[in-house]
Image (spheres, rainbow, N blue to C red):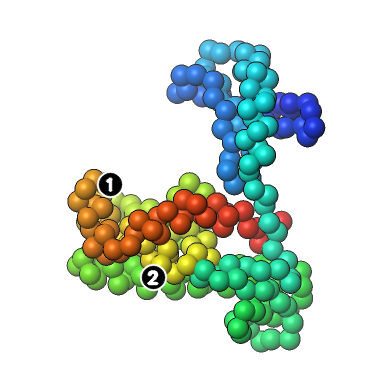
Amino acid sequence: MGRCVLEGNPPIAVALKRSARARRLSLRISRLDGRVTLTIPAGVAEREGVAFLREREGWLRGHLGQVGEMRQVRVGEVIPFEGRLLRLEAGQVRRTSISEDVLSVPGLAHQAPARALAFLKSKARDRLAEASDRYAAEIGKSYGKLSLRDTRSRWGSCTSQGGLMYSWRLIMAPPEVLGYVAAHEVAHLQEMHHGPEFWALVARLCPDYAIHRRWLRSEGDSLHRIRFVD
């Protein structure tokens, strides 16, 4: 539908979305980047939606103040990797490597974020494949294709055909957290639901899963706010 702007300090851009399925006007604020969306049901005039938005401006500004800022990766700054922080450096190295608390990448400074991203994705695939293989063997199942994405709504998924998908950003979390997500998705190879049998299987594969699940809920958004490319 377009967008409207709430005047003020600062002005707030709001995306307008028309939905035939919506039953009422609703506002959504992305916890990751603070984007605001107003959903307007079919049959409701746009001016009614804008009036609804203005009535809730105070609530909206209050919640936007709680959203963390996006962080752009640059040389000299730190990147989380397997639960620890590495300082990104660029220079005379042949290939990307880790030494103590430094992630060194070859090339010029402006190339460093993209090369660090490629390194993280490669390590994420290795670690997630290792964990998925281990858990699948424990329950006597096999999986199909393993793919990596940058999803905001979920850390992993399992298709009905046995394909596993994970967020590559899990490589920035502690290894135990990555392992929990792998156990969760592999458990779906046997139990394609979230009932008691499913959680019992997850607990068998990853006894401390509740701790790692809480970590994702409290810290996961911070991983999504890290940007490697403009």
Tell me the tag on residue 139: none
* Position above or below: 68 against 99: above
Question: What residue sits right under mark 2 in the picture?
Answer: 129
Task: Give whichever of 207, 11 is nearer the camera.
Answer: 207
Q: Quadrant of the C terminus?
A: bottom right
From the viewer's perspective, tell me whether residue 97 is left or right of residue 144: right
Tell me which numbered mark, 1 or 2, is placed earlier along the sequence.
Answer: 2
Query: Does dot 1 land on a helix, a strand or a loop?
Result: loop
Q: Position of residue 224 (x, y in %)?
A: 57, 54
- Residue at the (46%, 51%) spot, across then down: 217
Question: What residue sits right under mark 1 in the picture?
Answer: 194
Q: Position of residue 156 (x, y in %)?
A: 41, 55
Badge 2 density bin: few <14, some 14–19, many ≥20, Cα 10 Å = some
Q: Label 2 sits on what residue type?
A: Ala
From this viewpoint, is residue 164 visible? no
Task: Give whichever of 176, 94 is nearer the camera.
Answer: 176
Q: Label 1 sits on what residue type?
A: His
Badge 1 density bin: few <14, some 14–19, many ≥20, Cα 10 Å = few
From this viewpoint, is residue 119 visible? yes
* Position above or below: 134 against 48: below
Asked whether disc 1 touches disc 2, contact meaning CB atoms under 8 Å apart, the reply is no
* Position above or below: 200 against 139: above
Instruction: Determine which quarter of the picture holds residue 86.
Output: bottom right
